[in-house]
Image: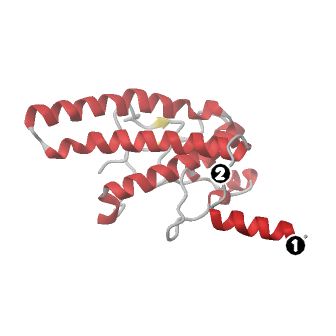
Amino acid sequence: VGATYRGHRTDAGPISRPLGCNMAVRREVFLALGGFPSAFGPRSGAKISSNEELATFTAITNHYSDECVHYVPTAVVHHFAPLSRCTFRYVISRSTVEGTSKADIRRLFGSSVMAADRTYLREVIGSSVLGYLARAVRDRDPRSLRAAALVAGSVIVTAAAHFTRLARTGLLRPRPSAGIARTLRAESTHQ
């Protein structure tokens, strides 16, 4: 499984959206920016986060320049992906986390930082879905059900980002569960 995609730079040079699986940053750059964005938290157990590299490199390019982050195609990464990450359940879980993290990135850096995501969704995911669907019909290839995973993942990322953004701005207030509501009522009568 490759980490680059159609439209990704193929030669060495500046990029705006590096991949987090293999990156090197000069120490003085991290010190100038206050270190790695720990607000996103480590991946552990059921609580996972995403987009730490996007936050890091957006801060770097905002502070220095758009030309200071480079893609090096000769850098090789061997990254183990367990079988559990090859399931539709994982796609749903990961997409939810991705959407929540995108809302946090947008809150920190503004909506313009999401321009690359909108272009990727429109140009890469959109055409890939059409290609997979055409192949599924033409070749009767069940592996082409990847289109469903792409569509589901894209919808979930978008929904999770919007829901998180609304919830964190106070425009959307989730209703407490019945148990929590009973506890709140009980506490208010005792005060």
In the image, residue 80 above or below residue 58 = below
Q: Which residue occupies the foreground of this view, 167 or 65?
A: 167
Q: Residues within 10 Å of mark 2 (few under 14, many from 20)?
A: few
For residue 61, the mark is none
Name the residue at 43% across, 38% down: 12
Q: Which residue occupies the foreground of this view, 13 or 152?
A: 152
Residue underneath mark 1: 190
Q: Could you tell me the amino acid type at mark 2?
A: Pro
Q: Which residue occupies the foreground of this view, 62 or 54?
A: 54
**Contact check, label 1 and label 2, Cβ < 8 Å:** no
For residue 174, the mark is 2
In the image, residue 83 above or below residue 99 = below
Position of the C terminus, as image quadrant, is bottom right
Name the residue at 51% across, 49% down: 98
Callout 1 secondary element: helix
Q: Could you tell me the amino acid type at mark 1?
A: His
In the image, residue 53 above or below residue 45 = above
Name the residue at 36% across, 61% down: 79
Give the farthest residue toward the left. 139
Q: In this rendering, does residue 91 appear at all?
A: yes
Residue 88 image position (x, y, % from top left): 32, 54
Q: In this rendering, does residue 57 appear at all?
A: no
Measure the C-alpha gap from mark 1 to mark 2: 25 Å
Residue 2 image position (x, y, % from top left): 32, 48
Give the farthest residue toward the front. 189
Q: Which residue occupies the foreground of this view, 175 or 57?
A: 175
Name the residue at 43% across, 32% down: 121
Residue 103 image position (x, y, % from top left): 61, 43
Give the farthest residue toward the right. 191
Colouring: secondary structure
Callout 2 secondary element: loop
